[in-house]
Amino acid sequence: MRSKHRIVWFLLTIVLAMAFLSPSYAVAQQERKDLVIRFSSGSYLDRVEPDKDNPLYLEIENLGNRAITNIRLLADAPEGWLVEFDPVTIDNLAPGSVVPIDVNVKPSRTATKRDNRLTFIAEGDGIRRVMTIWVWVENGPSVWLWVGLAIAVAVIAGFVFIFLRIGRQ
């Protein structure tokens, strides 16, 4: 009787081991593609000067478990602005990989002094990621600054003239 119990337990152990170790019970991770655009550490650009090169540094990262190929970088900027990427395309981005992107933003000479929207787009293998930032255009010294300086110089010159005139009498 004992040998029958041992045989039953042995067979039951083998069946359970086969059931749990069978490939059909192994949890397979689904293939997924996930792309992220972000600023490189400390490179956020919030002010730009018109008609000058304004560098910005981005990173493109593959957070998925499958390579992403043929990634194109695009920008949506105000009319007349020039946005250049280096590199413009990424042929293959392996899972967990990060690629640094140098971006040059050059607002037009006539860019108005206000907030402007810049949108960065990364597309590849049916995936599209978008990141939008707002930048302030800083024009050179405005006309009112020069007018204020001229008034200040005139007032100071007037006081000096009066002081010298009264000092002689």
Image (tube, rainbow, N blue to C red):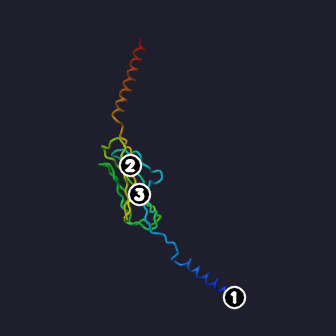
Q: Which residue is mark 3?
A: 101
Q: Residues within 10 Å of mark 3 (few under 14, many from 20)?
A: many
In front: 18, or 8?
8
Q: Nearer the viewer, mark 1 or mark 3?
A: 1
In front: 99, or 117?
117
Which amino acid type is marked by label 2? Asn
Q: Which residue is mark 1?
A: 1
Residue 46 location in percent, x, y? Answer: 41, 46
Image quadrant in which the N terminus is located: bottom right
In this rendering, position of residue 27 left or right of residue 112: right
N-terminal of the pair, mark 1 or mark 3, is: 1
Q: Residues within 10 Å of mark 1 (few under 14, many from 20)?
A: few
Which amino acid type is marked by label 3? Ile
Residue 105 location in percent, x, y? Answer: 36, 50
Identity of the residue furthest to the right in this view: 2
Q: Nearer the viewer, mark 1 or mark 2?
A: 1
Label 1 to label 2, Cα distance in Å?
A: 87 Å
- Say which element carries label 3: strand
In this rendering, position of residue 164 left or right of residue 4: left
- Say which element carries label 1: loop
In front: 27, or 116?
27
Q: Residues within 10 Å of mark 2 (few under 14, many from 20)?
A: some
Label 2 to label 3, Cα distance in Å?
A: 14 Å
N-terminal of the pair, mark 2 or mark 3, is: 2
Give the image quarter of residue 57.
bottom left
Q: How many marks?
A: 3
Give the image quarter of residue 146.
top left
Q: Which residue is mark 2?
A: 54
Image quadrant in which the C terminus is located: top left
- Say which element carries label 2: strand
Residue 93 location in percent, x, y? Answer: 42, 65
